[in-house]
């Protein structure tokens, strides 16, 4: 280099554009005697850092906070569930969230390209994209259900509150609390009450109580799902679900068609308005009669549960769903950040808001369940359901008993719609960004085409959920697809950063990006705590995993095999890409393996901080 070039080089070092000589990065900057900032197209950034933070919160605050977290609290001893949950939040959730966000921001790459940091584990990026893609398929099915309920919430009376519809059977009944035995007529249906418990159709009063089905359940099973007898009976395509899926995918496409440019604007509504709705529902719920009974059920701890390893396992698994490590979403979103964005601050804000939302949602859910217990005379444990059952059966039934039920139903399903959309934005973006980053010099037009094709292909795949056996497929996928892969991804992430790349070296990268190093405790958490705890929980999960069921339906043996295929399939890219990387290199096997576990020349800081070795023909 000439004198002027040497001066420019030193200036870049001082300004943080190039790493100092003693900075042990994947490539030592001063060893690149002919380096310059490369002239590749600049990666699109978020319009404002606040847009990134809103998108981050919208991604994390999803249905897992509203229907899964409260159920697990109730199942595992109430407030005592918060003890292992918060411990894992500190030891697993926060460190891994910060690691993934910092990796995405530092590299400016997708979940696939990021793994130039350790080419042997490039399959981790494929596994992340696979998990995100599978999540899109079944998550958008939930979105279509929400849209269906949302439209029907404007009807009077609410269609799930009566027993005189075409989908109702003679076993249908509407729960209500009456003060004395009586026979009444409601909605042209005769009912007989059973003391202070329930009222049922007169035609079924002499039937066994186990044969009775609530009007809300019949709307769910017979109207929305038109459910078949089992997984082997796919029946016919349900066109109302097909139309709901079309609407859901069109909404997703329109919101993400321009990537972070469009998502960054949409999240101003989708990430903030749910909190308005949650607060409104919370204020109404805690003022309902019986609400305190539900809150006590939610908060009073059963400390004997602390000795149950299963509770600790479920607490960690819930972190994957409510925080979002291992899915590739953090890496993808942060890759659109400006290089010096304070990602540590954003991580802290995200974790506090996300987990605060889980706790707040618990108050809303259990206040309503307490009210429902008061109205029906049933115990809360007999009412509470998990997953779709809580959102589409228990909650609509409770809201239908409030004054102005249409208003509360619209607000509730609008809230679900918005939180589901935010999560879908990011999961689809993970897949699209991975594909786009594999195409050299992809233009905005190419990205739009990829987005359209991806959404269309995913729509075609989700048509299986629009069959009469769709709910059985949904439950099978939900039960298995993320159970194993997310543990493996996060274990290997921790080992890669903590040991292979090196926590000390990674701290040097963070210091260059943030201007200071985070707490040194993170080094030891990434090296020891994360891989050890995650490995123990993975082994316990494999040893105690039980086959799924749906209500009274138990899956046949072949379905369990399909489920384990879903669980393993998304993890298979990890060993496949490892073997591929090793055998694509030249030289002795030992050297090829060694080189595969070292950062290559593409592992460099993002955008204007990115370095590359230039050939002698470049004139430098």
Image (spheres, grey):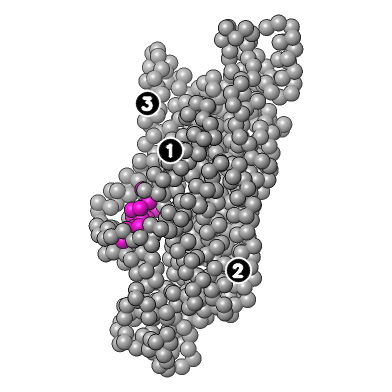
Main secondary structure along the magenta-highlighted residues? helix
Residue 77 drawn at (x, y percent): 51, 64
Q: How far apart, in angstroms, are the residues tagged by discs 1 and 3?
A: 15 Å
Does the magenta portion include 471?
yes
Q: Could you tell whether 607 is left or right of 148 in the image?
A: right
Does the magenta portion include 26?
no
Mark 3 in CB contact with mark 2 (< 8 angstroms): no
- Residue picked out by circle 2: 281
Residue 297 drawn at (x, y percent): 54, 71
Q: How far apart, in angstroms, are the residues tagged by discs 1 and 2?
A: 38 Å
- Residue occupying the point 72% across, 31% down: 515
Q: Which residues are magenta?
A: 461-480
Q: How far apart, in angstroms, are the residues tagged by discs 3 and 2?
A: 53 Å
Q: Could you tell whether 54 is left or right of 535 in the image?
A: right
> Secondary structure beneath disc 3?
helix
Q: Earlier in the sequence, mark 3 or mark 2?
A: 2
Crowding at dot 1, Cα within 10 Å, few <14 / some 14-19 / many 20+, comes out as many
Q: Earlier in the sequence, mark 1 or mark 2?
A: 1
Q: Earlier in the sequence, mark 1 or mark 3?
A: 1
- Residue picked out by circle 3: 579
Crowding at dot 2, Cα within 10 Å, few <14 / some 14-19 / many 20+, comes out as many
- Residue occupying the point 61% across, 64% down: 277
- Residue picked out by circle 1: 127
Residue 263 vertical position relative to residue 185 in the rendered view, above or below: above
């Amino acid at each position: 280099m000439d004198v002027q070039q040497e001066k420019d080089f030193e200036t870049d070092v001082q300004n943080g554009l190039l790493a100092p000589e003693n900075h042990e990065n994947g490539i030592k900057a001063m060893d690149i005697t002919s380096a310059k900032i490369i002239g590749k197209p600049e990666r699109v950034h978020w319009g404002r850092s606040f847009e990134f933070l809103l998108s981050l919160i919208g991604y994390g605050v999803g249905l897992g906070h509203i229907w899964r977290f409260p159920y697990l609290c109730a199942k595992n001893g109430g407030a005592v569930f918060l003890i292992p949950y918060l411990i894992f939040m500190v030891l697993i959730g926060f460190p891994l969230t910060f690691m993934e966000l910092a990796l995405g921001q530092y590299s400016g790459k997708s979940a696939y390209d990021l793994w130039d940091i350790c080419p042997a584990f490039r399959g981790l990026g494929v596994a992340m994209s696979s998990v995100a893609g599978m999540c899109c398929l079944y998550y958008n099915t939930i979105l279509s259900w929400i849209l269906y309920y949302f439209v029907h919430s404007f009807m009077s009376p609410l269609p799930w509150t009566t027993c005189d519809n075409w989908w109702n059977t003679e076993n249908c009944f509407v729960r209500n609390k009456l003060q004395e035995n009586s026979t009444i007529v409601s909605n042209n249906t005769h009912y007989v009450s059973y003391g202070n418990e329930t009222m049922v159709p007169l035609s079924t009063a002499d039937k066994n109580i186990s044969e009775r089905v609530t009007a809300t359940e019949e709307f769910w099973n017979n109207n929305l799902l038109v459910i078949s007898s089992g997984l082997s009976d796919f029946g016919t395509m349900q066109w109302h679900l097909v139309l709901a899926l079309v609407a859901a995918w069109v909404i997703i496409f329109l919101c993400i068609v321009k990537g972070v440019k469009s998502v960054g604007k949409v999240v101003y509504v989708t990430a903030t308005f749910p909190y308005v709705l949650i607060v409104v529902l919370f204020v109404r719920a805690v003022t309902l009669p019986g609400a305190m009974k539900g809150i006590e059920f939610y908060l009073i701890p059963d400390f004997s549960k602390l000795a149950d390893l299963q509770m600790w396992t479920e607490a960690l698994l819930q972190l994957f769903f409510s925080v979002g490590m291992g899915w590739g979403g953090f890496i993808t979103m942060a890759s659109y950040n400006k290089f010096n964005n304070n990602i540590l601050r954003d991580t802290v804000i995200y974790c506090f808001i996300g987990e605060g939302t889980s706790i707040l949602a618990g108050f809303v859910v259990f206040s309503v369940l307490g009210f429902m217990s008061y109205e029906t005379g049933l115990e809360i444990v007999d009412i509470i359901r998990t997953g779709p059952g809580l959102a589409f059966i228990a909650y609509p039934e409770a809201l239908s008993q409030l004054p102005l039920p249409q208003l509360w139903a619209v607000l509730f399903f609008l809230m679900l719609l918005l939180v589901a959309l935010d999560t879908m934005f990011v999961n689809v973006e993970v897949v699209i960004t991975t594909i786009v980053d594999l195409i050299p010099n992809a233009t905005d037009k190419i990205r739009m085409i990829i987005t359209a094709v991806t959404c269309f292909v995913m729509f075609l795949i989700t048509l299986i959920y629009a069959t009469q056996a769709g709910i059985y497929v949904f439950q099978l996928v939900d039960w298995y697809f993320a159970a194993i892969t997310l543990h493996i991804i996060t274990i290997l992430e921790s080992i890669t950063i903590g040991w292979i790349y090196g926590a000390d070296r990674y701290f040097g990268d963070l210091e260059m990006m943030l201007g200071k190093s985070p707490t040194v405790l993170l080094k030891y958490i990434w090296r020891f705590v994360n891989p050890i705890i995650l490995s123990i929980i993975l082994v316990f999960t494999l040893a105690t995993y039980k086959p799924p069921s749906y209500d009274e339906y138990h899956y046949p043996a072949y379905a369990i095999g399909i489920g384990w295929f879903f669980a393993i399939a998304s993890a298979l890219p990890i060993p496949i890409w490892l073997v591929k990387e090793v055998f694509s290199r030249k030289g002795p096997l030992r050297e090829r393996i060694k080189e595969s576990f070292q950062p290559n020349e593409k592992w460099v800081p993002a955008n204007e901080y990115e370095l590359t070795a230039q050939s002698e023909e470049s004139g430098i």
